Amino acid sequence: MSRVALISSTLKPEEVDALADSIIGVFAKGRKVHRCDVTREQAVAFAIALDEALSIYKELSRQAAAELGEYPKQLRALAKAIPPIKKAITELGPDARDRICLAQWEVFRPKKFPTFNYGERFLLWLEFINAAVERDLKGIGSAPSSRRPDLAMQSLIKDLADRFEQLFGIAPSYSRNGTFYQVLEVAAEQLTGFPHISQNRLKLALPPPAPCTNDQAP
């Protein structure tokens, strides 16, 4: 899945101002914890970053949904194609195998005359592929959505975490009392389509917090 480039903010100036005000409010409430005074320029920059990251998240989610929709069809086509190939190879007689080995030698010109080991190795790989296809087909639709890797969500969190630390000099944490978590909650309230990001999602995407990180209450 390719990253989406050249995404710019679509927020109106008054929407940027309102979101920036909320971000400043979050920092004001937690000043005793993070000891960080936020300028309006920083808040505006992160408000725009939130909207840009949301646009990328929406596009990545759309791409992932399209790919996932085709994946079961592709697996079923592969599962249907493998058995006839295996049957055709295993039913080859000695003369046919010798002729194939001769053709391999004429095409590839190996240092020594090939045996039908190539065909047997190919069968083994077909077995591996077939087993993997069957396993994945059984798993589709049975795994809870919370256990499926959401690459769009992970990208959203990582991009915003990096920008948060760059702008404010605070390492983001997944603490509910943390400034990063609270800012994401504000974004979910004020930005249309911005997902509510649970603490568990943040734990999966963020590195463990340092013992004395500035973004969480003691």
Image (spheres, helix red, strand yellow):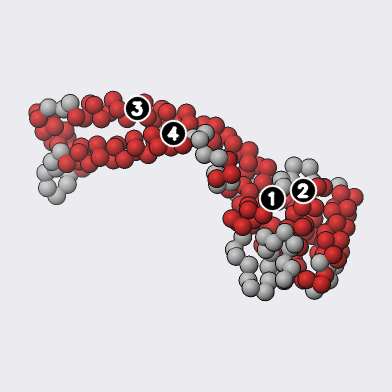
The disc label shown at residue 197, or none? 1
Looking at the rendered image, the disc whose residue lies closer to the viewer, 3 or 2, is 2
How far apart are the two marked residues, 3 and 2, measured between alpha carbons? 46 Å
Q: Residues within 10 Å of mark 2 (few under 14, many from 20)?
A: some
Residue 218, percent across and down? 72, 71
Is residue 96 positioned above or below 184 on the image?
Answer: above
Is residue 154 positioned above or below 92 on the image?
Answer: below
- SS at mark 3? helix
Residue type at mark 2 is Ala
Is residue 102 positioned above or below 18 on the image?
Answer: above
Q: Where's the N terminus, which quadrant?
A: top right
- SS at mark 4? helix
* Left or right: 96 in relation to 82: left
Using the rendered view, name the quadrant where residue 68 is placed: top right
Of the residues under marks 2 and 1, which one precedes in the sequence? Answer: 2
Residue 161, percent across and down? 68, 60
Residue type at mark 4 is Lys
Residue 146 visible (yes or no)? yes
Looking at the rendered image, the disc whose residue lies closer to the viewer, 2 or 4, is 4
